[in-house]
Image: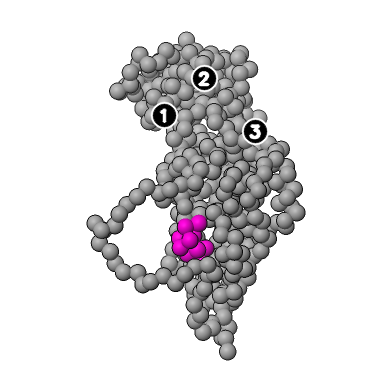
Amino acid sequence: MAKTKTVYVCSSCGADSPKWVGKCPSCGEWNTYVEEVMIKESPAKRIIPGLTESSKVRPVLLRDITSKEESRINLMDEELNRVLGGGLVKGSLVLIGGEPGIGKSTLVLQTVLGLTGLKTLYVSGEESSSQLKLRADRLQHQNPDCFILCETNLEQIFVQASTIQPDLVIIDSIQTMFTEVVESSPGSVSQVRECSAAILKYAKETGTPVLLIGHINKEGSIAGPKVLEHIVDTVLQFEGDQHYMYRILRSIKNRFGSTSELGIYEMRQNGLRQVSNPSELLLTQNHEGLSGVTIAAAIEGMRPFLIETQALVSSAVYGVPQRSATGFDIRRMNMLLAVLEKRAGFKLVQKDVYLNIAGGLKVNDPAIDLAVISAVLSSSLDISIDPDICMAGEVGLSGEIRPVNRIEQRILEAEKLGFKRIMIPYNNLKGFDLRQTKIQIIQVKKVEEAFRQLFG
């Protein structure tokens, strides 16, 4: 007879304890222990239909292993291919996470419907087949080889997969799947762990790539045990503000490519549209004569693009001045305001300062420091900055403009978009041939020099 046992399992590292504890002794996280009911039965061997019993694995010398280039599947989506490192590797396990309603299922279904000649099995544990049909009709894509399966039992999914023999499998979502091997509710730590391990075994032994869609918790990380992110080959984060139309696909982990790439999409009524040149969409051309607006040449991942930095400085209405930043680190903005007051002599103690990165983007590139302090000073003096100039530079605590990386890409991107001048740090052009560009390059050492160039 099976024995029932209640244990507490850490949702971060998977450690278990006979009683609840506030701080996990293994990983040090707080309030991560959840109660689970474990039923111990006689050990049974997991059988995945369609897989043959492999022979015992023996150790092999490293010099005897032959390496070959991984074959990839073209997903007919330049942004997704770029983030994956050139396409989807056969036999890989990819996890896509994001907030509810951000567009994870839309992205995957749109990609699947755009593939022709590729037999696909789309397993949905959250939506019915009629709901998926309505979404597919809205996306206006058709794939005659796309099979829809509304099922949450993992064993039944493997039976159908062995019958269809698909070239690509989609699981939407991993938190809704359950296996009969573990007696607990779907979405629990043990269920997610066992289901992901079984799917990984299926992907590696059959060579079928699998895309997993995962939920995130209130902290912003993938829901479920941390082992889920460890066993998969690639972890993609789909993020963005629901009130804005732009979505960013980042690579957090990638065993077959770089984690510095990102893809940008625009949410529309008929699905997601790829944004090949985000600079043209993030810039508005009607800010001439307006103060507090500057253009920064930023690098996000491996892609350069120009963003619009907006600042508003006004007299403080209340006793304590307000400091607010959208899309920019508020602590770094406070540091830049202190540099302005100490090194440049501009008094902002009794001023409210509001900073906004246009387009709803969140930028962590320190090279936009120069654009931030220029926008703040422009709004404080109520003097507009010439719209044909952009800037890139990190501001140090002593007021110096520090060099930034990949300055060549920033300069070429600014020239491509029609800017006439670009302000960069001094001695940041080592090895760069100035003859290959026609844009005027202004090199500055300190913030005082930058202000003299901008405001005279």
Residue 177 visible in the shown view: no
**Type of amino acid at the residue the image marks with label 3:** Tyr
Sequence order check, earlier mark of 2 and 3: 3
Q: Which mark is residue 434?
A: none
Which of the 4 image quadrants contains residue 58?
Answer: bottom left
Which of the 4 image quadrants contains residue 248?
Answer: top right
Q: Which mark is residue 318?
A: 3
**Type of amino acid at the residue the image marks with label 1:** Glu
**Type of amino acid at the residue the image marks with label 2:** Leu
In the rendered structure, the answer to whether residue 305 lies left or right of residue 244 reads left
Q: CA distance from mark 2 to mark 1?
A: 22 Å
Q: Which mark is residue 394?
A: 1
* Residue 170 is one of the magenta-drawn residues: no
Query: Up-down: is 14 above or below 358?
Result: below
Q: What residue sits 59% from the left and 39% below the top? A: 247
Find residue 250 and report its horizontal and vertical position in percent: 51, 43
Mark 3 vs mark 1, foreground winner is: 1
Find residue 78 and report its horizontal and vertical position in percent: 52, 37
Q: Which mark is residue 417?
A: 2
